Amino acid sequence: MPNAYARASCGRKYFGKGRFAMKRKLKITVAVVLGTVLLAGISFGAFVAAMYIEAATFDVKGTPFESKYYMDEEGLFLADIPRDEYITDGAEYVVEGERIFDIRSYGASPEADFKTNRRAINAAITEASEAGGGVVKVSGGVYTAANIELKSNVTLRIAADGELRNISYATDDSENTEHNAAADVNDATDNAFIFAKNAENIVIEGPGRISGQGATYCEPAEDASVFYPLDEFDLKAYVLEHRKRIMPGKEHETERDYLIAINYCRNATIRNAELYEAGSWTVRTEGIDGLTVEKVVINNNVRVANTDGIDVMGGKNIVIRDCFISTGDDGICLKTDPENVPVEGVLVENCEVFSLANCFKIGTATYHDVSDVTVRNCYFFMPGIAGGYSGIAIEATDGGKISDVTVSDIYMEHVTSPLLIWLGYRKDGSALEDVSVTGITSVGCDLPSAVVGYKKGGETHSVKNVTLADFDVTYREAKEHTDIYLGNKVCAGKMNMGGYPEITRVSHAYFINHTLSGYYDLPVYGLYAAYAEGLTVRNFNVTPRSSNTRPLSNVAF
């Protein structure tokens, strides 16, 4: 038997071996982990590289097409807006005996700085309102100003030889600091060129121009060239090329100046005027009761991001008619934020709309209900270039209910997709039902229409009671490359109903940025439907490209 010293030595000896073994095992484990991380990093790097290589190798050659209207050489503005068909000399709006408050009498001048003109114009408006009403007249030149507040019973009239021009971004950032410091970012009127709140019986009219210097509020686009329709249509290439041409804002859209913002007013009218080059949304109304927009030309730089034409953020008794809208984002849009009220009672008719997003849209923000909406007799178009998403987009995503919507007699030329009806779940509880879309002619489209609900947590949430009738759709002739996601056997396509709704994203997987994301074609060329209860389809005719290999629809009709 070993002595005590020997036993102690033996213990130390074996203890040392155990510690060495543990260290060795730890080193091996660390090496395995580091190796796994390294391999994962290499795999991820290879994936990223592959996606960027793919994007760089897309065939993006395109060819313009003949159109009723066309763009200027830089692809920024529509070149041939029929202004005289919409805007008159304004004689029919002049009332005998009306009181005129000329801004020049209050110190405004085309040569004055924006602060002087702001004080003068607001003084004229205040005096007219306090006198019981009147016409504040802008004539005899271009007046640069900022933060003009319209008040009850006042008409702001821009004469044919007059223009109200918003300050540039540089001026707003460096010289309008006192106003900006006091602004409430949650109050749209604090970030608007012309605004009204809690007023009644207000009118903004031409025949002159209100301009926003919108391009100064944005950075240059990644690609300044004109985007023409692809000779070989590829969905992901289309999305990436379209987005390259957008001029991103120097600030968020809600912090850039709206051209006109009207909040919680009663009986407001915008008519017979040109609204030019907004820096964010062109017309934004919130909680309004009684709005008429008629004979208005919206002429925006279509590269400027977020330049919606007309946005109704909650309200009732809305009429938008006889307008011409050319803009880089949604043309006419009904929506509701959490702090808004529902939208009810809307008529849109006899409008021509060019949009690099959606020509008519309900959504995306739908925190409250939207109901009793009629859209009829409109022309939606693209002027020889590519871009945009749907002619008609109806999207419930944030807990509100969209219902009782009727769309009829719409003619579309080269709009990417005729129709998207989307029930999603950015916020649970949304509903979409009782929609009728009839009498749709679409010439030169690139993508099918879709009616989609979703399944979440084993529970189905369906779009209900939709009628589609009398569609006559013809695709633009081109080669096409399709990439259809087949992993989901229920939908035959990867659904993305919790994300941002667009016809390009019905089958989509967002990852970090658009280049790394998956954009998948729908497995049909005509009508794709999923989770749609009570869908009625009649006389739905679609002529595909000659290179097409997909079926008309995944539903029988």
Image: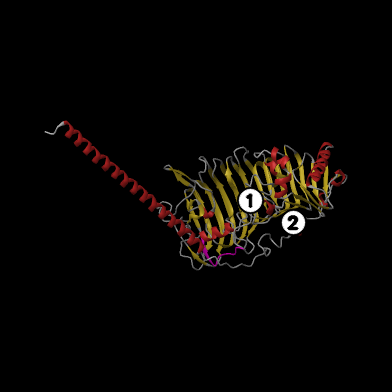
Identify the residue at horizontal 20%, vertical 35% (top origin): 9
- Disc 2 to disc 1, C-alpha distance: 30 Å
- What are the residue bounds of the magenta stretch? 226-234
Which of disc 1 and disc 2 is earlier in sequence?
Answer: 2
Q: Nearer the viewer, mark 2 or mark 1?
A: 1
Which structural element holds mark 2? helix
Residue 523 seen in the current view: no
What percent of the width, then of the height, locates residue 489? 40, 53
What residue sits right under mark 1 in the picture? 249
Identify the amino acid type marked 1: Gly
In the image, residue 232 lies in the stretch drawn in magenta: yes
In the image, residue 292 lies in the stretch drawn in magenta: no
Q: Quadrant of the N terminus?
A: top left
Label count reads 2
What percent of the width, then of the height, locates residue 74? 67, 63
What percent of the width, then of the height, locates residue 238? 54, 60
What residue sits right under mark 2 in the picture? 86
